[in-house]
Amino acid sequence: MIFGLLALIIGISPFIAIALLISYMVRRSGGDAGRALRRLFRYGMLLVLMILVGTGLSGLVAVADPDFVGGPGFTAFMLACVIIAGPGLVLVARWVARSLRSSGGDDPGWEIYLVVAELLSLGVATTGAYLWAVGLIDGRFRITPAALMVVWGAVWFIHYVLAGRRDRARYVRYGILLGSLGGLVTGAVFGILFLEALLERIYSLLMSTTVVLGGPDPIFGGLIGLAIWGAVWLFYWVFLGLRTERTVWWRAYVLLVGVVGGLIATLNGVWGLAYRILDWFFGDSSDPARLHFEELPIALALVVVGGLAWRYHRNVLQGAGPVSRSEVDRVHEYTVSGVGLVATVGGLVAVIAASVGAMVPGDLVDGSDRSDLVAAVTVLLVGAPLWWRYWIAAQGVRQADPDPELHSPTRRIYLICVFGAGAVVALVSLFTLAYRILESLLEGDFGTGTIFDVRWSLALVLTVGVVAAYHRAVRRVDLSDQPPEELPARVVQTVVLVGSGGGEIASSVEAQTGAKVQVWERTDVDVSLSAETVVDAIESAEHEHLLIVALPDGHEVIPYTR
């Protein structure tokens, strides 16, 4: 069921992404769907041809690799990519250049293409560099990954230069932050693998065990990956991202990726350490110390890498100076609070279930009950302080400055999701509990076995039900304290702008007024309208449909009916 749902989500996600992309380009094109689709087709063709040419060039170089086993069919395909797609790439590139010159360079499709092409080529080039470096450690010079590194590295450099010629403040929201994200996540994963392998080697030496390697040394593999993707992160974030404007996207990256991601990794490591230590003293594990503590290296690696990421990004955020509380801060706060709440509820449920199980006769109880109880208590000790810290902070802000918090969509979504999910889980658990008890009563075998069987349902009803009821009460208090919104009656429904460059202000006018805006470009004279002028005309109008025409000496507002 879960895997089927996951496969469905993965299957439809490309179509959702394309739909969102088309919607964005239509909005940036002033509502002209035809123009947006032409742009999408043009840049999609350019991207496909670029991929074919890059694949063909790297594939032809790979033929010289002694380990190459592709055969004539592979070589023919790579030659076809270069011979056919190469001239096509030149023609489409000239077509794009002419289009950019005619539009003055303001084309959202070009921005999206640059980001996708740059990050795609960067991913292939760094993967090739990693495989090539690992081969060198094994004493082999592999031509295929070297070809990927060189060819796609050149493709990346070309697109990075092209992107650098554009407005960097706009580009930073996508290219630089996405590059920083890829470098940080991949570098952190390899950092954890490197530190885990190193600590495992030290642990094996301390425990006097023999290490048998069935492939490349994981220490060097992790170190190479850390060096390559760490360099990517340094380039995109330290040399570019830190020097750019602190936008909402910038804060979202620092808070949600750096701070929250690092904190979650650290908490997983802390839980692993605490569980292994507490289970050794209070659990019922019969394994020797060498086997019981063999997971300490990965836990320590998570604590070190996650803690460094968390601490660094917190320092970056504090060094950016005080800023007003935004939805990004609320998303960060409620996300961490939610993680702590889930851990707290899970720990409480397990503690209650284990406690109920401990009350029944011993022949029904699994021998690992004490270890399960230790794991539950450990989760509770890690999650409860986390939830309390962030939830109390959010409630404190709500009491000190209630108006923005009461109108915050993040807080509203958090409370509704916790109450809704908790209510569903509690009701399902209550149904299961009632069904099992009634079945036992009707069959005449109600006893300790029934209590043992329903211990998880009982724990879920008690814990999740209380949590859902509490958040429902908080939501009701928010609703009672929230003053009713007096929405002004919107008179104007649709607006047609006639002028030059109207597409640039259409989205702004729609966001400010709620009216649907359509743009007609004038070709006889070069006159334009400002967003302030259009908004003023809409707010002072008394008709549902307006035609606003830009004139050399001002503008004219013409009401009309459909």
Image (cartoon, rainbow, N blue to C red):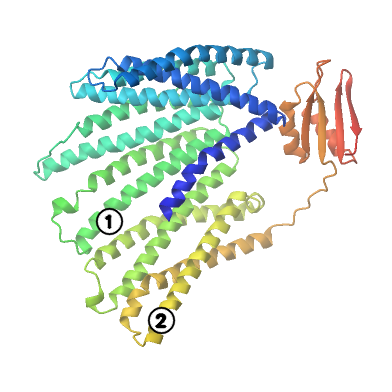
**Crowding at mark 1 (Cα within 10 Å: few <14, some 14-19, many 20+):** many
Q: Amino acid at mark 2?
A: Glu
Q: Which mark is on residue 106? A: none
The answer to whether residue 73 is left or right of residue 138 is right
Q: In front here: 239 or 75?
A: 75
Q: Alpha-carbon distance for marks 1 and 2?
A: 38 Å
Is mark 1 in CB contact (under 8 Å) with mark 2? no
Q: In front here: 379 or 322?
A: 379
Q: Amino acid at mark 1?
A: Tyr
x and y, in percent, of residue 163 in the image: 53, 19
Image quarter of residue 211: top left
**Crowding at mark 2 (Cα within 10 Å: few <14, some 14-19, many 20+):** some
Q: Badge 2 is on which residue?
A: 439
Q: Is residue 112 above or below residue 339?
A: above
Callout 1: helix, strand or loop? helix
x and y, in percent, of residue 542 in the image: 90, 41
x and y, in percent, of residue 328 in the image: 56, 42
Q: Badge 1 is on which residue?
A: 275
The answer to whether residue 273 is left or right of residue 535 is left
Q: Nearer the viewer, mark 1 or mark 2?
A: 2
Q: Which quarter shows the N terminus?
A: bottom left
Q: Which quarter shows the C terminus?
A: top right
Callout 2: helix, strand or loop? helix
Q: Residue at x 58, y 62 (%)?
A: 474
The tag earlier along the polypeptide, 1 or 2, is 1
The answer to whether residue 327 is left or right of residue 560 is left
x and y, in percent, of residue 470 in the image: 54, 66
Q: Residue at x 59, y 33 (%)?
A: 21
Q: Residue at x 23, y 44 (%)?
A: 297
Q: Is residue 384 above or below residue 226?
A: below
